Amino acid sequence: MHESGIVDPGGGDANSTAPENTTAPPEQTAGTTPVVPPGPGWFQRLSSILFIIFCFELGLFLLIYPWTDGWADNYFAWAVKGSVQPAWHSFWDNSYVRGGISGLGVVNLWIAIAELFRLFSRRGPRKFKN
């Protein structure tokens, strides 16, 4: 009861700033299951597939291209001008540099394969109907 003699039906103080909970949470019965709205699972799966394709293609390119004839004639092989150009070109044609670039390709292929396994392991076992 307040000083004015009016009883607050909520049981709280009239001057209180705390919000009152007027809605009770929905009660579930033992036989019902909650309805879950569809989530963005299709977008995550599509993003994973596109990422797998990108890493696979980039990995194959980086693995193979440094060992082709086009490697010595691309833009980056001749990007440096002036007196540093012969040293840069010999560095660019070095087998260790080519192997390092191919190593990055192997890493990209590994990422693609790991992502592929992660994508299919997340789906869980399939349930067949009899």
Image (tube, rainbow, N blue to C red):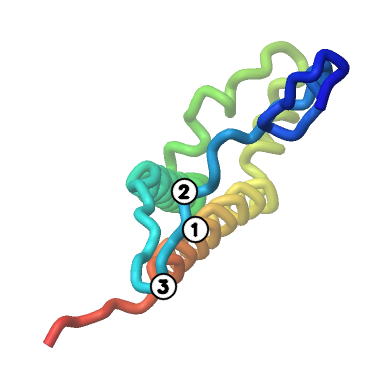
Residue 59 on image: x %, y %: 48, 51
Picture quadrant where residue 127 is located: bottom left
Instruction: Classify 81 as above or below 73.
Output: above
Residue 86 shows in this picture: yes
Q: Earlier in the sequence, mark 1 or mark 2?
A: 2
| Residue at x 61% of width, y 47% of height | 101
Residues at discs 1 and 2 in contact (Cβ within 8 Å): yes
* Amino acid type at mark 3: Ala
User: Mark 1 highlights which residue?
Assistant: 109
Q: Please give the name of the residue rendered at 47% of the width and 50% of the height, measured from the top-left corner.
A: 26
Camera-side mark, 3 or 2: 3
Residue 4 occupies quadrant? top right
Per the model, the C-alpha gap separating discs 1 and 2 is 6 Å
Q: Is residue 91 above or below residue 107?
A: above
- Measured Cα–Cα span from mark 3 to mark 2: 48 Å
Q: Nearer the viewer, mark 3 or mark 1?
A: 3
Q: Which residue is mark 3?
A: 30
Whether residue 33 sits left or right of residue 79 in the image: it is left
Position of residue 75 measured from the top left corner of the image (x, y, whole percent): 52, 23
In-image side of 117 versus 16 (left or right): left
Task: Kindly identify the residue that appears in the image at 81 percent across and 27 percent down.
Answer: 1
On residue 55, the disc is 2
Regarding mark 2 in the picture, which secondary structure is present there?
helix
Q: Is residue 67 visible?
A: no
Q: What kind of element bears circle 1?
A: helix
The CA distance from mark 3 to mark 1 is: 49 Å
Q: Residue 22 or 95: which is nearer the viewer?
A: 22
The quarter in which the C terminus is drawn is bottom left
- Measured as percent of width and height from the top left, residue 10 is found at 69, 32
Q: Is residue 70 above or below residue 44?
A: above
Residue farthest to the right, as pictured = 3
